[in-house]
Image (cartoon, grey):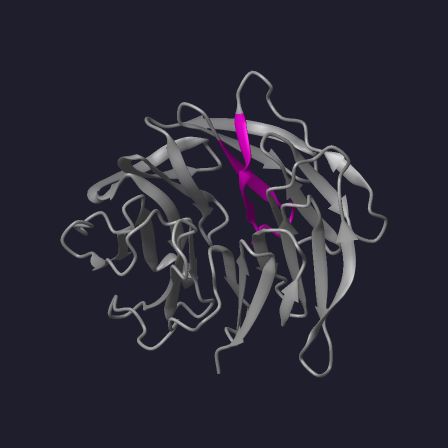
Amino acid sequence: MNCNIDAAVSSVRFHATSQSLLAASSDNLARIFTKKADNTYTLANTLSVEGLSLRKADFVQTHDNTVLMAGPSDLYVIDTETNVAEKVKLDRDSTWQTESFVVSSNRRDSSLVSILGEQGKIGLVSLSARCQIASLRASGRISAAQFLSNRQDLVTVSDEGAVHIWDLRMYRCKRELRSDHFTSASALALSKNDEILAIGTNEGVISMHLAWQDGDTDVESTAKVNMSLTSAIDGLNFSHGGNFLLAHSSAKKNALRIIDSATGYTEPGWPTQQTPLSFVHASDFNSADSELAVGNARGKILLYSLF
C-alpha cells in the first residue's frame, strides 16, 4: 500500500489480527484500513473528535471496535461502530503528554493505559472506568514507558539515565537500573516475553540489553550497541517474534534501520538511497512479522512485505 492522505502521518498501528491498519495524521483524522483478499488495503473508516489536535491513535486490542485517540493533553476512547467519543478524565493538577500513551494489551479484565507527565510523573488510566486511577513518580523527565508481558509491571526510562520497573499492584518502584547507555534516552522497547530491553537516545545510539531483569546482570557491560543512526530516536519496535528491532528518527531523511536482535548489527541493503521513506514519523510490524508499515511526513503510508 502506498496511500497518500495529504497530511503528515504521526502514528501507524496494525491490529492484532493483522487485518486492519490504523493511522493518525496531522489533518486530525484517524483512518482505519482493512485488508482485502488480494492483500491490498482499503479505507474502511475515518474517525475524528471535534477540537482535538490529533497526535496518536491506537487499537485497544482487548476491546473490539475500540480506538484511543490523543492530542497534546486530552485522551479519548472511540467506538468505531458508532463513532461516539468519550473523554478520559485525568488529574488536572498535573500536565500530561497524552500522546505518549501506551496501552497494556495483555490485561484480560480491563485495559490499562500509561501516560507521561512533567517532573517524572506517570499516570495510570483505566479504560473501563474512563479515568485516571493512580500516579507514579520518578526522578528526572520520563522519556518512554512500556508494559511488561506479566500484566503487573511497567518499565520506564528517564533522561537522567535510569530505568525503573514499577509494581502496578502496589504502585511502587521495585527496581532501578542505571547505565551510561540510558543517558538522554528518548525511546524504549521490549522484545517478546520481555527478554530484551532496547533504549534509544537523543544522539541516535541504540543499546539492547539481555537478561536485564536479572539482579546479577551488569546492563552496562552486556549491552549490544548500534550507532547506525545519528539523530534522536523517535521510535523503537521489536518484531513480534523478537528477531528484529526497528528504529527510526524523524530528524533526518530515510533514517530507519532494521537491527538483528541477536547480533546488534544493522540489516544490510535496506533501506537504500532510492527507498522513498522520506522523514519517518511512525512504523509498525504486523503480528505475523510479514508486513512493515511506515508513515512519513509526506502523508504516505508505505507497506513493505518482509517475506
Q: Is residue 89 above or below residue 66?
A: above
Query: Where does the image place residue 117, in percent across and percent down from the top left?
Result: 48, 28
Give above or below for 34 relative to 12: below
- Secondary structure that dominates the magenta span: strand
Q: Nearer the viewer, residue 216 or 84?
A: 84
Residue 243 appearing in the image: yes
Quarter of the view holding residue 111: top right
Dividing the picture into quadrants, the one containing residue 48 is top right
Q: Nearer the viewer, residue 264 or 125?
A: 264
**Residue 303 rendering spot, x and y as whole percentages:** 56, 71
For residue 42, above or below residue 112: below
Q: Is residue 105 visible?
A: no
The span picked out in magenta is: 96-116
Report the residue at 29% width, 51% height from top: 204
Residue 155 at x, y percent in the picture: 39, 43
Horizontally, residue 288 falls left or right of residue 44, namely: left
For the point 48% across and 83% down, the residue is 307
Residue 92 included in the magenta stretch of the image: no
Left or right: residue 46 versus residue 152 is right
Q: Residue furthest top?
A: 93
Q: Position of residue 18 (x, y in %)?
A: 63, 69
